[in-house]
Image (cartoon, grey):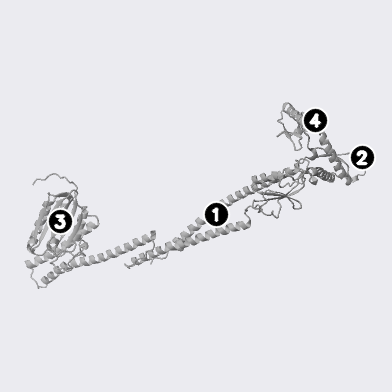
Amino acid sequence: MAREVPLRRSLLLRLLALAVLIAVGSIAATAWLAVRTTAGAIRQEQGQALADDARIYDTLLAYAATHPSWDGVDAAVQPLARDVGRRIALTTETGALIADSAPGSGPLPTTSSATVDALAVDTTLMPGSSPPGGGAGGMGRIDPRAGGPYLLPPEERATLRGRATEAVRCLRLRARIDAVVVDGPTGRPRIDTPGTDLADTAACAQSRSALATPTATENRALAQLNALVNTCLARRRMSAVQVDLNWTWTRQPAASAPDAPPTEGIDQEHNRAISACVGTSRREQLLPYVAPAATLFVSDPGGRPSSTFDLSPANQTRIVAVAGLVLLVTVGVTVLAGIRLTRPLHALTGAAQRMRDGDGSARVRVTGRDEIARLAEAFNDMAERRERLEQLRRAMVSDIAHEMRTPVSNIRGWLEAVEDGLAAPDHRLHSSLLEEATLLQHVIADLQDLAEADAGALRLHREQVYLDDLLAQVAEAHRVQADRVGVTVAVRTEADPQVDADPVRLRQVVGNLVANAVRHTPSGGHVTISARATDTEAVVSVTDTGSGISAEDLPRVFDRFWRAEKSRSRQTGGSGLGLAIVRQLIEAHGGTVTATSVPSHGSTFTLRLPHHDPTPPPRTR
C-alpha cells in the first residue's frame, strides 16, 4: 500500500485554506468598504442633521429677535418643517405649546433640542453669532438681529445710505479700494472692503466719520442704554462709562463717581464688571422688543427623536460577530464540501491500489451525476475492460501453449522413438514430422502477423488488384484440399471489380476465409467466392453450406483462439487465429468484415473494401 498523503498536502486542507483565505479576504474587503461607506454616510447624515438643526434654530431665533411675541410663528414653522422633513415644536418655559408642525404625531420628546432666546444665543448651534465687542457677561450672546430701539426709520436709513455711498465712491476713486455698502440688522449701512482693513488707511476719513455718527434714534437708544449701564455700575460703586454703537465703552472722569473705591485701578476686574453691566443692560433694554424664551423640540415626523447609527463599541462588536459567523459558516460548508469531494477520491485510490495488488474485481460505488461520478464510472469501465482483457490474455497464452505444445510434442515423440529404435526413419515418418513442423510454422506466422498489426507495424504494398484474377488464384490454391473432402469451390464476379490493395495480404485474407469454409463444409457441400462493385466499395463474399454458427457464438468469431467447435481435432483443425488475422488485415486496408450464418445451412463472410480509384484504365487480357 502506498503511504498516506501528508496532512499539509491533503486536498481537504488545501480546500479549507483556500476557502478561509477567500472568506477572510471577502469579509475584510466588505467590512472595509462597509465601514468606509457607513462612516461616510454617518458623517454626511450627521452633518446634514446638524445643518438642519442649525437652520431651524437660526430661523426661529431670527423670528424671536424681530418680533415681540411668538404670535404668527406657525407661518414660519410649517414650511420650515416641510423643507427639512422634521417635526418642529415650540413650547413656553412652563410647557405651554406655542407651535407644532405635526400636532397629531403623538407626544413631544422628553428631551428638548434647544432653547430659543434672542438674548441668550446657543453658540454651539450658532458658532458665528458673537458680534464684535462680545465678552464677559454674555454680551456677545445677544442675537445681532435684535434691533429693538436701534431700528432706524426710513428717513435716517436713506441719509446714512447716502453717506455710505459717498464714502464708497471716495474709497474707489482715491484709495483704489473695492468697497461695497452692506445694510446691518438695524438698517444702519456699513462699508465692507473684502481683503482690506480700513483702519490701515486714512483715505476718505471725513466721509467715513460722517457715516459713523449716530442718528437721533440711535442717540436716544444709546442714552437709555448708558443710563442703565451706569446705574448698574453705581450699584457696584464703579465710575460711569460711555457706551458707543459698537458696544465698546470709554470711562468717564473720576469726579462723576466721587464715592468710587481706590481699587478701581484693577483694569481686568473692572473690564469684566463693565462687560457684565453692558450685557445685562442691553438685554434689559431689548427685552420688550423680542419674543420670550421658548423651548424647541425637533424629532422625526413620527414623533421619535432623531438618531443616527454610529460605530460605537457595541456596533463594532456586532460587526465582528457577524463576520465571525460568516467565516464559521464558510469553514463549515467548505469542510462538508471537501469531505464529499475527497471521500470518493479516497475510494478510487483504494480501488486502484487493490487492482494494482491483483484484485481484478475492485470497483467503486457510483453516486450522483457529477464529475466525480463520471470518473468513478470510467474507472469501473476501465476495471471491467482490464479484467476482460486479462481473461483473454490468460486464455490466449493457454491456447498458444496448447497449439504449439501439440506439434512440438509430436515431433519430440517421433524423434525419441527413432532414437530408441522404436520407429524407422522412413518416408512416412519424414512426412509426418514435416506436417507438424509446417503447422508449428503456421501458428508462429499467424502470431507474428497479429503482433505486427497490434503494433501498427503491418506494412502494405498497395497496387491495383483485379478481383476476378485474385479470387481465381485463391480457388485454384484450395481446390486440391476441397476435392479431397468432396467440396466444390466456385468463383463468381460482376463487372470485373478492382481495388487498391496489397495483393499478397488480400490473397491471405480470402485464403483464410476459403480454408475455413472448406474445413467446416461436409462432403458434397459448396463454397462460393463472389465479388461485386458498388459506387463506393468492392464487396467480396465467401459463402459455404456447412454447419453454420449459432447466434450466441456469431459475435465472437473474430476473437483470437476462439472456435465454435471446442474440440481441437485435426478434422476441425486450425489455430483459432485465421479470422482474427482477417479482421486485422481488412481494417489495415480501411475496410470491414462481417459474418452472417444460419445454423445447419451455412455461413457467409463479407469483405468490404473502399475504392481508391473508381475509374481505372481498362486492362488487356
Residue 436 in which image quadrant: bottom left
Q: Which mark is in front, 1 or 3?
A: 3
Mark seen at residue 28: 1
Nearer the observer, 89 or 392: 89
Element on which disc 1 rests: helix
Relative horizontal placement of residue 408, taking residue 282 as reference (left or right)? left
The CA distance from mark 2 to mark 3 is 155 Å
User: Foreground mark, 4 or 2?
Assistant: 4
Q: Residues within 10 Å of mark 4 (few under 14, many from 20)?
A: few
Q: Is residue 344 left or right of residue 223?
A: left
Marks 1 and 3 sit apart, C-alpha to C-alpha, by 78 Å
User: Considering only order in the chain, which callout, 4 or 1, is on the residue closer to the N terminus?
Assistant: 1
Mark 1 to mark 2: distance in Å?
79 Å
User: Could you say whether the residue bearing mark 2 is in a helix, strand or loop?
Assistant: helix
> Callout 3 environment at 10 Å: few (<14), some (14 to 19), or many (20+)?
many
| Front residue (pair 32, 356) | 32
Q: Is residue 240 visible?
A: yes
Circle 3 sits on which residue?
Answer: 541
Of the residues shown, which amino acid type is indicated by label 3? Ser
Q: Position of residue 299 (x, y in %)?
A: 67, 51
Whole-number angstrom distance, CA of label 1 to CA of label 4: 70 Å
Q: Nearer the viewer, mark 4 or mark 3?
A: 4
Q: Are marks 1 and 3 in contact (CB under 8 Å)?
A: no
Q: Is residue 107 above or below residue 163?
A: below
Q: Which quadrant would the N terminus be assigned to in this image?
A: bottom left
For label 2, the residue is 255
- How far is the residue under mark 4 from the one under mark 2? 31 Å
Q: Amino acid at mark 4?
A: Ala
The residue wearing badge 4 is 210
1 or 2: tag closer to the N-terminus: 1
In the picture, residue 132 is in which quadrant? top right
The crowding category of the residue bearing disc 1, from other C-alpha atoms within 10 Å (few below 14, some 14 to 19, many at least 20), is few
